């Protein structure tokens, strides 16, 4: 069964466990895509399908980001991937997992971020998967960083949601 892969910008969902982060955030965005009806939802499988296997162009962007940000003593994606013993999806730490939501994120000297993947089921329409990012900057470097990467962030999230939806979110 083919799923609609149209990704749309939306208001960040109040139902998300990161909603308390919206107030005072330096950056917030949210995108959604139709989610296939499924008897069970494994948020780890969904997160892995969205962020687990980056495309070549995204890996190239990460390489550039890591080369530049390492000069400012900001953790690289490799540093994040290999730091700590916590559960990870690629280089994102899994901070919380609920039946219909998984929260990824990291805290660093320049900024803290949270990325929520939330399945919202509806009675009269298709279920939706929302990807919501919230960033709190600690200093000027954090504010400059988020301003520079925001357009790339949007491209990555939209592309990854579209690709995961086209592949059935790992359920096929």
Image (tube, rainbow, N blue to C red):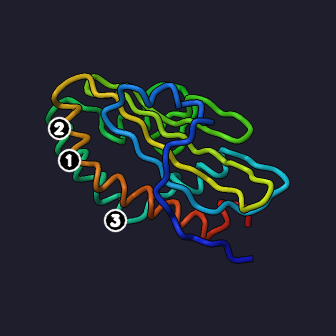
Query: Is 162 positioned to the left or the right of 152 in the image?
Result: right
Label 2, secondary structure: give it.
Answer: helix
Residue, disc 3: 57
Label 3 – label 2 distance at C-alpha:
23 Å
Q: Are marks 3 and 1 in contact (CB under 8 Å)?
A: no
Label 3 – label 1 distance at C-alpha:
17 Å
Label 3, secondary structure: give it.
Answer: helix
Judged by depth in the image, the label closer to the viewer, 3 or 2, is 2
Residue at 35% x, 42% y: name it.
77
Judged by depth in the image, the label closer to the viewer, 3 or 1, is 1
Label 1 – label 2 distance at C-alpha:
6 Å
- Pointer 3 local density, CA inside 10 Å: few below 14, some 14–19, many at least 20: few
The mark nearer the N terminus, 3 or 2, is: 3
Query: Is 159 positioned to the left or the right of 138 in the image?
Result: right
Where in the figure is residue 139, as x and y percent of width and height?
20, 24
Q: Quadrant of the C terminus?
A: bottom right
The mark nearer the N terminus, 3 or 1, is: 3
Where in the figure is residue 40, as x and y percent of width and height?
82, 50
Residue at 35% x, 35% y: name it.
79
Residue, disc 2: 144
Residue at 62% x, 44% y: name it.
118
Q: Are marks 1 and 2 in contact (CB under 8 Å)?
A: yes
Report the front residue among 20 and 164. Answer: 20
- Pointer 1 local density, CA inside 10 Å: few below 14, some 14–19, many at least 20: few
Residue, disc 1: 148
């Amino acid at each position: 069964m083919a799923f609609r892969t149209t990704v749309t910008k939306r208001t960040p969902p109040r139902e998300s466990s990161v909603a308390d982060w919206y107030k005072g955030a330096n950056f917030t965005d949210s995108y959604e895509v139709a989610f296939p009806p499924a008897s069970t939802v494994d948020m780890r499988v969904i997160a892995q399908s969205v962020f687990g296997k980056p495309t070549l162009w995204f890996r190239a962007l990460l390489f550039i980001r890591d080369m530049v940000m390492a000069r400012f003593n900001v953790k690289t994606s490799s540093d994040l991937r290999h730091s700590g013993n916590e559960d990870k999806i690629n280089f994102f730490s899994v901070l919380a997992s609920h039946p219909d939501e998984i929260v990824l994120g990291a805290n660093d000297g320049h900024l803290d971020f949270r990325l929520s993947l939330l399945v919202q089921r509806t009675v009269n329409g298709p279920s939706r998967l929302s990807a919501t990012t919230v960033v709190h900057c600690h200093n000027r470097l954090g504010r400059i960083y988020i301003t520079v990467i925001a357009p790339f962030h949007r491209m990555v999230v939209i592309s990854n949601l579209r690709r995961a939806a086209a592949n059935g979110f790992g359920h096929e």
